[in-house]
Amino acid sequence: MVSANDVQRLFLQGVFSRSILSFKHAQVLWEKCIDTVKAANPTLDIRFSDKREDWNSFVISINNSLNCLDLEFRHLTDEQTGREMYAMVNRKDDEIAQMATDYTPVEIAYFKAVVEQIMLAPHEAYSVSSLLALREVNSLKTTMTKAQAEIVLGSFVAKGWLLKSRRGRYSLSTRTLLELLPYLKSSYPEDCLECIICYEIVTRGVACSTPNCKARLHYHCCKKYRSRNAKCPACSQDWPQDLKNMTPVGEEAIKDGQDEGRRVRRKSPEDGSDEEDEEEMEVEPSQPSQTQTQSQRKGKGNGKGKPPTDMDVDEDEDEEDEEAPQQTQRNGRRRTTRTR
């Protein structure tokens, strides 16, 4: 016998068949489900309502039904359009298990590697070039080729996990931000920016150009705020009339060729040090340092004619040789210089 509970069942079936849908589409789906149930059982007293509070109550009832499955019908504002978007989200702490049904473990590892480069991009660019994305294959212990990686990247874009711009840069989609937000916040807590207006994650938007001001806003949040206030909500400094004159967050914050180096997260030492994690950029092997070269020449000079007579001198030279590569490694590290 058809009952009012079948509205939820039909609605969830419709949601599971879609990866992500807007608020308007979700309301249309809800209305169609009610009409279908009423057509099957006209005696039911159920009606569609376009009031926001009724929609919120319906979403709460759905999430209560999904609690035992660790699923949630969650919403997030699209950073580009400002539209409210909904998707079914896995709440368990298994990172990116949402992709397990569509991709192999190797492809998931590749996706995580690309996401890391996006999150650690310099200048708050939150994007990565096609070249650097393909190079991430080299960091994986796998036989995946760059040609195969290019196909997988296309699949990530086609299925809504990544966005690809006209410049050929990859960035996180609304679906990824919705479904993987807990993973992003736990893995990159220092790199997740928050909009000062809506308090949601920001990977595209603007930043206050005042030095040391940490205000970050989505474009749509900034436009709404600027319509009634021309001062920064954090530092109270006057903002320029044109948003193009503000500091960008996202792809526009970086120029082509500025992110050629691969960045990795360096964990804190295991000896209990309180040193915070830093961004570290891997660089191509460089020429030997000046200290190394001098030590090597000095060692060769001592080897000519007669053997060394003072072992302490040799030990000191060995220590210098050991310290030189360490100094070179320190010089290879780069931290993002942009103030947040």
Image: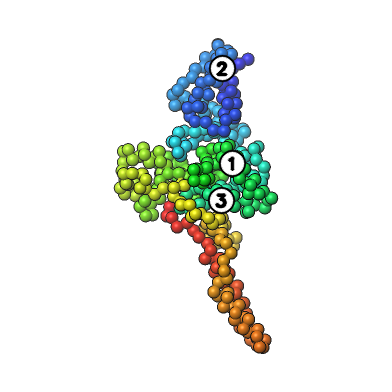
Question: What kind of residue is marked 3?
Answer: Leu
Give amino acid for label 1.
Answer: Gly
Q: Nearer the viewer, mark 2 or mark 3?
A: 3
Quadrant in which the N terminus is drawn: top right
Amino acid type of disc 2?
Answer: Thr
- Residue name at image x 57 percent, y 33 percent: 19
Q: Which residue is mark 3?
A: 131
**Residue 72, image x, y percentages:** 56, 34
Q: Nearer the viewer, residue 24 or 51?
A: 24
Q: Secondary structure at mark 2?
A: helix
How far, Cα to Cα, is label 2 from label 1?
37 Å
Q: Position of residue 234 (x, y in %)?
A: 36, 47
Lateral position of residue 78 relative to residue 326, left or right: left
Looking at marks 1 and 3 on the same chain, the residue that comes earlier in the sequence is marked by 3
Residue at the image point whose x is 59% and y is 34% from the top: 71
- Residue drawn 51% across and 27% down? 26
Q: Residue furthest top?
A: 43
Does dot 1 land on a helix, a strand or a loop? helix
The residue to which callout 1 is attached is 154
- Disc 2 marks which residue? 36
